Image (spheres, rainbow, N blue to C red):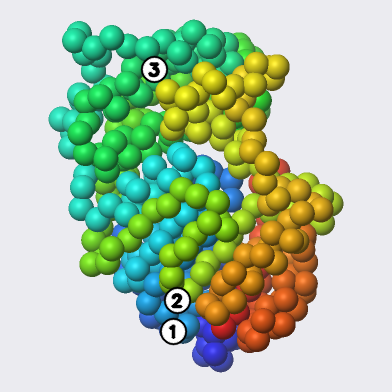
Amino acid sequence: MGSVAELRAIDPNRASMAMRAGQLSFLTSVTQRPHLTDFVSTRFQGSKKRLTEWIWASVHDLEFDSVLDLFGGTGAVSHMFKGAGKRVVYNDVLRFNWHIARALLENNTVRLSEQEVDTVLTRQPTLTYPTFIADTFSGIYFTDDENAWLDQAVHNIENLLDDPYKKCIARFALYQACIIKRPYNLFHRSNLYMRTADVKRSFGNATTWNKPFDVFFRKFVREANNAIFNNGRENMALNVDALEVNEDCDLVYIDPPYVSDKGTATDYFGFYQFLEGLAQYEDWPDRIDTTTKHLAIPSPATPWVRPKEVASAFDAVLRRHAEKTMVISYRDDGIPSVDTLSATLRELGKTVAVHRLPQKYVLSTRATHEVLIVAR
């Protein structure tokens, strides 16, 4: 039985209440929950951090020793599996997400010291600093002083830290600091004026927006350091297209961008393209679309955000991993439908179970369910 079913057998009223509330922390008493080091706070759209206990409750009874996380995103689910002692192979096509995964998943022991943080945050008289962000993005995402700070921080991380994992920890802190200081935590439009306008506000957090970058940088380094642990396995972080991953794992976890049944896609690249620029700072000037008001990096062509192509992409991924146990994080309003995905998996000889959890998503007026399709 799945763990929710187990709980229903033990205490049906408690199970019903928990499903309505979307809170399953008490499942620790009836399932073998992994030891989880605290994961970092995250403001990324689509993060599964708050659903990890529900996901674990739905898969803990499967037989597997290794996990391939094809669309790893924030790494919350990979971190959960790492905490369960599994060998984890994380993959994400976004470079900044790969940096985060190297820091928190592939890395088992390396941390960033307070002295090294001080070094990253100090302007060095022996270095000549670039001014690309300050010269290019004035009045778009951050203030002029903040843009200059970002140029300095990127240069210090690259030139003053010698360990690749330490660089990734510092980059994680930089990305998180950028997000927390942005209205809506996104970079799909400029809207700096929301921070700087002298008006009465009914939303947002001006106190947070106006705190210095270095305060947040220190905060997120501490979070990263606390989330790093050694599970005794050789975990790996990759940065390739999902169909290019060749690692052999027992279980494949699939959490792609969603295309709703109305044809609306979640363009994570578009939401976080500024972070992708920071992650590839030297190449950034050549990638900008100067015709866009917010000087964005164009989103790469991908079938995962195209309503007419996403079903074929899904089919290719499922058939590529047909011999493995597959777990798909999804929503009940997606293209292709849950029924379509389940039918394809059954055609591949799988036994399919579908778990649902009521959810209310930010910026959405529709009530829907988080769905977990488990195919073994």
At mark 3, the secondary structure is helix
Q: Which residue is mark 1?
A: 63
Tell me, yes or no, whether the two marked residues, 2 and 1, touch with CB atoms within 8 Å. Answer: yes
Residue lying furthest right? 262
Q: Position of residue 20 (x, y in %)?
A: 64, 69
Q: CA distance from mark 1 to mark 3?
A: 47 Å
The crowd level at tag 2 (other Cα within 10 Å; few <14, some 14-19, many 20+) is: some
- Tell which of 135 and 41 is nearer to you: 135
* Residue type beneath disc 1: Glu
Looking at marks 1 and 3 on the same chain, the residue that comes earlier in the sequence is marked by 1
Compared to residue 13, the image places residue 299 above or below, namely above
Q: Which residue is mark 2?
A: 250
Can residue 296 be seen here?
yes
In percent of the image, x 40 and y 20: which residue is there? 150
In percent of the image, x 64 and y 38: which residue is there? 300
Looking at marks 2 and 3 on the same chain, the residue that comes earlier in the sequence is marked by 3
- Tell which of 22 and 145 is nearer to you: 145
The quarter holding residue 376 reads: bottom right
| In the displayed structure image, the side of residue 303 where residue 112 appears, left or right | left
Q: Position of residue 31 (x, y in %)?
A: 42, 81
Compared to residue 24, the image places residue 368 above or below, namely above
At mark 1, the secondary structure is loop
